[in-house]
Image (cartoon, rainbow, N blue to C red):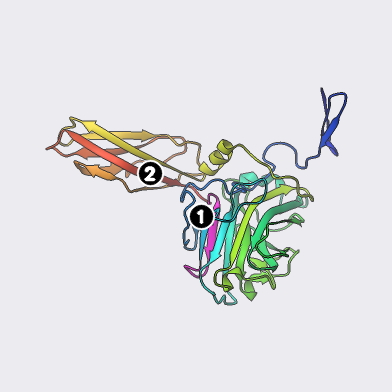
């Protein structure tokens, strides 16, 4: 079988009797700049429903940003509602109140894309690349919905709109965005850009769809406010952001690859340990290396678990975390016991954007 590569037709395979052509846009590799766009990874909540506060991450890489608390629940793949064909999971939002959204308030589900992962867009220059955002969406409401692409400072934004025609039905949407030739767009390990799907935004935070603006816009003018209706639902999956003016098929990556991409920003470990015949004033240590190199030195939280015959502990209080370097946990034994036990303790490392 011969294989030819053509910039227009993509890959062409010829076995002498049949020919299959697979067009592609943007080349090989990291075509979809959205991580966990198919919503398979949920390290924090393992599929459980949560009522997120402003700034809380829900499914991996998806943060909830809101100006009022406790107005919705977010869950991975709600029981009784299947994902669209080709997907197993989605991010599901359910409104828990008929929220009055003032002119200066907004509610969104957002992915923050690291600068390294969009540097080739060349945004902020005359060579800015056109991109296409595509996704599957379902809602109990119909009408025009909105969102925005935003820079880190929130002072250069592109509101977009799309239409949901039928209630409680999966529909695929795509929006093509002309590259930003102005504005500041980070290209290292900071927050390069934000992709926001609005659940409701006031008038001063909504702008004309389809144009770049220096105003602080989160959605398109006149878009449906999901959280204004008690019990309204909004489900989304298959989110893809790619170079080019045409949406291509979803860039499925192996589960292990997608998990590792998520672990650059968030990873956790649970551990149990028993030490035998540890004397008074002696310490025992656990070491751990990051699963993958993290975006930056993460914050660390230790939570949960139980302790037996531990009279004091030091959980990395004196060692600065550095990418690729192990941390240490030290526990001091009770002098009256032969065994010191730490069970089901969790270490959480957060380097989110």
Give the side of residue 279 with respect to residue 132, left or right: left
Quick check: marks 1 and 2 in contact, CB under 8 Å? no
The residue tagged 2 is 347
Whether residue 25 is situated above or below residue 66 in the rendered picture: above
Q: Position of residue 234 (x, y in %)?
A: 60, 62
Whether residue 157 is situated above or below residue 345 in the rendered picture: below
State the residue lying farthest toward the right. 17
Give the side of residue 145 with respect to residue 89, left or right: right
| Disc ID at residue 58 | 1
Whether residue 86 is situated above or below residue 231 in the rendered picture: above
Where disc 1 sits, the SS reads loop
Mark 1 Cα shell of 10 Å, populated few (<14), some (14-19), many (≥20): many
Q: Quadrant of the N terminus?
A: top right
140 and 197: which is toward the camera = 140
Residue drawn at the location 35% of the way across and 41% of the way down: 319
Q: Position of residue 28 (x, y in %)?
A: 72, 36
Residue drawn at the location 33% of the way across and 48% of the way down: 304
| N-terminal label among 1 and 2 | 1
Residue drawn at the location 65% of the way across and 60% of the way down: 138
Residue drawn at the location 11% of the way across and 38% of the way down: 336
Mark 1 and mark 2: span between their CA atoms?
A: 18 Å
Provide the major secondary structure of the magenta segment: loop
274 and 264: which is toward the camera = 274
Q: Give the range drawn in magenta.
A: 58-71
State the residue lying farthest toward the front. 80
Q: In which quarter of the image is residue 32?
A: top right
Q: Quadrant of residue 24?
A: top right
């Amino acid at each position: 079988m011969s294989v030819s590569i053509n910039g227009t037709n993509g890959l062409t395979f010829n076995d002498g009797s049949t020919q299959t052509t697979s067009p592609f846009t943007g080349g090989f590799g990291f075509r979809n700049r959205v991580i966990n766009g198919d919503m398979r990874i949920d390290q924090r909540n393992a599929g459980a429903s949560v009522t997120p506060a402003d700034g809380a991450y829900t499914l991996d890489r998806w943060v909830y940003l809101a100006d009022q608390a406790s107005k919705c629940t977010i869950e991975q793949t709600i029981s009784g509602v299947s994902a669209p064909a080709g997907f197993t999971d989605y991010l599901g939002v359910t409104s828990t109140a008929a929220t009055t959204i003032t002119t200066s308030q907004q509610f969104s589900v957002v992915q923050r894309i690291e600068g390294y992962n969009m540097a080739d867009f060349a945004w902020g220059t005359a060579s800015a690349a056109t991109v296409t955002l595509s996704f599957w969406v379902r809602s109990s409401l119909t009408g025009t919905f909105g969102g925005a692409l935003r820079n880190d400072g929130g002072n250069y934004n592109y509101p977009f709109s799309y239409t949901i025609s039928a209630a409680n039905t999966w529909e695929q949407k795509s929006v093509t965005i002309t590259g930003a030739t102005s504005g500041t767009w980070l290209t290292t390990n900071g927050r390069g850009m934000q992709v926001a799907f609005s659940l409701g935004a006031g008038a001063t935070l909504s702008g004309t769809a389809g144009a770049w603006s220096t105003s602080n816009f989160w959605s398109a003018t006149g878009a449906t406010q999901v959280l204004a209706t008690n019990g309204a639902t909004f489900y989304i999956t298959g989110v893809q952001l790619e170079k080019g003016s045409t949406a291509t098929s979803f860039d499925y990556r192996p589960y292990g690859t997608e998990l590792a991409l998520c672990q650059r920003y968030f990873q956790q470990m649970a551990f149990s340990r028993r030490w035998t015949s540890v004397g008074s004033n002696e310490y025992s240590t656990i070491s751990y290396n990051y699963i993958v190199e993290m975006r930056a030195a993460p914050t660390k939280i230790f939570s949960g678990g139980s302790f037996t015959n531990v009279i004091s502990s030091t959980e990395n209080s004196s060692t600065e975390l550095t990418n690729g370097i192990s941390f240490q946990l030290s526990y001091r034994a009770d002098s009256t016991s032969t065994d010191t036990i730490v069970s089901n303790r969790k270490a959480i490392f957060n380097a989110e954007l």
